[in-house]
Image (cartoon, helix red, strand yellow):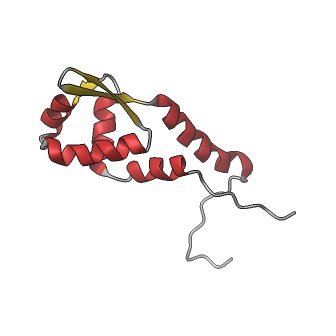
Amino acid sequence: MKATLSNPSTDIILGFHALSDPIRLQVLELLRSQELCVCELCEHLQMSQSKLSFHLKTLKEAKLVRSRQEGRWIYYSLNLAQFIALEEHLASYRRFSPILPARNCLEPT
């Protein structure tokens, strides 16, 4: 039986891309326990709003964070549904692949 290759959806690709940056991971860590406004994120990360806005845009495009505007400020929170989608994507590799012990690449097969 031949395995069929499926292409990951754009959301999955954007999600893993967003997770590949240390600054974006710091943002997600800060949002883990509470919603924060952009000014609070800037303060915690000691970074300008213009630099942070690029990372927040990437996280929003990847659907990892949600935003809402209140007055002048934009508040960010985690979008847990997208984290679940990424987890399920990774779990599919574990579920349908035999788990093999780690091998030393230098050992002859």
Give the left or right position of residue 73, taking residue 82 as reference.
left
Residue occupying image coordinates x 17% and y 29%: 40
Residue occupying image coordinates x 36% and y 43%: 59
In the image, farthest residue toward the front: 71
In the image, farthest residue toward the bottom: 108
Could you tell me residue 16's position as x and y percent? Answer: 46, 50
Give the left or right position of residue 88, taking residue 47 as reference.
right
| Image quadrant containing the N terminus | bottom right
Numbered marks: total: 0
Camera-side residue of 38 and 102: 38
Give the left or right position of residue 17, taking residue 75 as reference.
right
Residue 31: quadrant of the picture: top left
Camera-side residue of 62 and 97: 62
Residue occupying image coordinates x 17% and y 39%: 45
Q: Is residue 61 above or below residue 84?
A: below
Give the left or right position of residue 28, taking residue 1 as reference.
left
Could you tell me residue 46's position as x and y percent? Answer: 12, 40
Q: Is residue 38 above or below residue 95?
A: above
| Image quadrant containing the C terminus | bottom right
Residue 56: quadrant of the picture: top left
Residue occupying image coordinates x 20% and y 20%: 71
Could you tell me residue 68's position as x and y percent? Answer: 32, 25
Could you tell me residue 102's position as x and y percent? Answer: 60, 60
